[in-house]
Image (cartoon, rainbow, N blue to C red):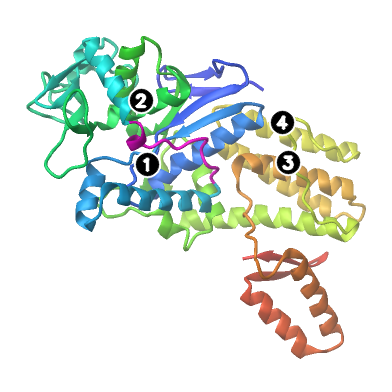
Amino acid sequence: MTVSIYNTLTRLKEPFESQEPGKVKMYVCGPTVYDYIHIGNARPVIFFDVVRRYLEDVGNDVQYVVNFTDVDDKLIRKAEQLGRTVPEVAETYIAAFNEDIESLGVHKATINPRVTDHIPQIIAFIQGLVDKGYAYESEGDVYFRTAAFADYGKLSHQNIEELQFGIRIEVGDRKQEQQDFVLWKGAKPGEIKWESPFGEGRPGWHIECSAMARAYLGDTLDIHGGGHDLQFPHHECEVAQSEALTGKPLANYWMHNGYIHINNEKMSKSLGNGITVNELVKRVKPNAIRYFMLSTHYRSPLNFSNETVAQAEKSVERIANSAANLKHRLSTISGEAQIVPVISGNGLIASGESDLDAKLQVIHEQFHAKMSDDFNTPDAITSVFDLVAEANQYMNRNDASAAGLRALLALFERMDAVLGLLPKLKEDAELLDTDIEQLIVERTEARQSKNWARADEIRDLLIEKNIILEDTPQGIRWRRK
């Protein structure tokens, strides 16, 4: 299956070929850990999680690196406000980030390098640029000489002449030219700092990712990703400093996701309309948040509203109910409710029923056709609903077989291994699945014998444990809230 990717660098959709067949080197810019992540941060976190999952699904070993910027002006200000050290603030919000992505069903990166653990590599990188004449020292700072890199602007398609007045580039009197950007910041009194050949100080923002990406993935990445807002200046500056040092492309494919708007307005601090993931997961199911993020093509803007999120919740509920009903129907036939594990490779579990197998094959092929076309998740979700329709129809047939139900479940799990839309069941230390099923049997027997007190007692216990009972044509089924 050939995967095509829209490459921000070329503005073209191109067939994806990794440098080493079967292995993908992928770097995505991570958070500056001075606060909880907001839903704008969550979009790339979820989307690139799906990119990584799909590339693995089609047979690749993905080295997935997402950095933590744990020293920065924002961290320094936050530490001052809280009366804490910069490392203490970073630890707090790294833990919060990990908790947030876990709640969203995001798989952890292969590695999350921290800036403060890579100061020697950053200093060596900067020294290499100074030695080559691409960087210069000025009153304790070190700047990249933008005019020395002829291709500056090629990623964002900006004309360097348009940058002469410091547009989106920090203006400073110590620079030779206003479009030059800082690589090393001289220490200010009381700030966190490190020794270097350029004097005490700390790294600039742009140099961090270049140094860490190179440390773990080499001179050239297969994929570099991030939000649309990072194209310029962050990624443009990464390109300049990395390619100036190595003489090689920093990345062969560049991917950028679109903005998120809140009620049709741009999300911004000035409008005070930001929503943190930490807040959102308290009132919206995490799999519905994933659905919302994936229901629009990643390069398009995405509008958040109560209405769009409510629709997402209804949609994931429909998917989850279909999968749960299949599992329940299977248990009534075979006495075995266990979902079939995800299949590796491109094979499908065959039911032995030619009509069903043919339909599942078509759904599977359509899913891959959409995912391989620049990760078109909205259309891939359409394939999931095609499966929902087929499953709902099949399970209500009197001649539904265990083999057919298993084949349907296997495809659900296979597609969901990429999208992550089915709810993640939480283990309950006090009430296991087998306990719940036994209680349901006992409650049914109590009702049949008109022991209403015991039936109500069991019902109340299940409610307390957030277990929802639902009557279906096949009998009572349960799910965790």
Spatial CA distance of label 1 from label 4 is: 36 Å
Whether residue 263 appears in this view of the structure is: no
Question: Is residue 193 highlighted in magenta?
Answer: no
Spatial CA distance of label 2 from label 3 is: 37 Å
Q: Which residue is mark 1?
A: 31
Q: Which residue is mark 2?
A: 211
Element under label 4?
helix
For residue 272, side relative to residue 253 (left or right): left
Q: Which residue is mark 3?
A: 342
Whether residue 122 appears in this view of the structure is: yes
Q: Is residue 324 above or below residue 303?
A: below
Q: Which mark is residue 365?
A: 4
* Nearer to the camera, 219 or 124: 124
Indicate which disc, 1 or 2, sits on the residue closer to the N terminus. Answer: 1
User: Which numbered disc, 2 or 3, marks the residue closer to the eye?
Assistant: 2
- Residue at 73 percent across and 48 percent down: it is 389
The overriding secondary structure of the stretch rendered in magenta is loop
Specify start and end residues of the magenta stretch as a single range. Answer: 106-118
* Nearer to the camera, 307 or 179: 179
For residue 390, side relative to residue 22 (left or right): right
Q: Give the crowd class for mark 3: few <14, some 14-19, many >=20 residues within 10 Å.
A: some
Residue 463 on image: x %, y %:
64, 76
